[in-house]
Image: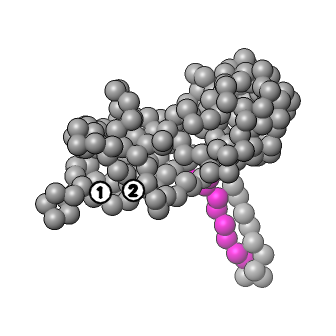
Amino acid sequence: MYGIHDDDGLIAQLSTPMTVRSNKPVFVSDTLSLTRKVEARSTQRWEIETKIVPLSTSDANRLMVSLVTKGYHTTFEVSVPQNSTVRTQRTQLDDVTVSGGVFEDEITISGSTGLIPMGTFIKFTDHDKIYMTTADITGNGDVGVFPRLSSEIVGKVTQCGDNVMMTCYYDTDSVTGMHYTDGVLMDNGTVKLVEAL
């Protein structure tokens, strides 16, 4: 189950409709002859726009406390939603060891016996950035990742399943409190969660 966590665990489930977006700054302009000029930056972050559902009455209280106390300035953890096809195809259930150089777009995997499908979100131990595989890999070998590595990873264990946790902020257009429908039903509308870099 994917959702927002506090120090005691999962407090709210991510619900649909949901958008997982890659925010990579790109500057595009057209000349008078309609030639397109494109310049892309190397930076990238993941953003999730979703509705959230507390798991219980006590979790509703914990969610409200999270929204108010974290505000726009304090990070928290979100379990990253994997694509449904990734979840059904993946046979590599345990963490694996990886290595790769800074600014490279490929990692070397060892200690793997199963399939890690393309589009799998992964995270390295002691490394806050979330990456996505760009090809299928079964067993050990090299696989592409997006975005390029922001720092060197040597012997780092990779989270590649439903246990991938992203450090996030609530975006500035999210309600830092609670909205009630008919005085009882909690409805914060769509909440935007942005990866903390």
Give the residue at the far left of this rendering.
Answer: 183
Q: Which residue is mark 2?
A: 51
Q: Are marks 2 and 1 in contact (CB under 8 Å)?
A: yes
* Residue that sits furthest to the bottom in the current view: 33
Residue visible at 47% across and 35% down in the picture: 167
Q: Is 190 a magenta residue?
A: no
Answer with the quarter of the image where residue 101 lies. top right
Name the side, left or right, on which 193 lies relative to 55: right
The range drawn in magenta is 23-31
> What residue do we see at 23% from left, 38% from top?
58
Extreme residue toward the top, this view: 155
Q: Identify the secondary structure beneath mark 1.
A: loop
Residue 188, label in figure: 1
**In the displayed structure, would residue 40 be above or below residue 74?**
below
Indicate the amino acid at tag 1.
Answer: Asn
Residue 174, labelled with which disc?
none
Secondary structure of residue under mark 2 = strand
User: In the rendered image, is residue 104 in sight?
Assistant: no
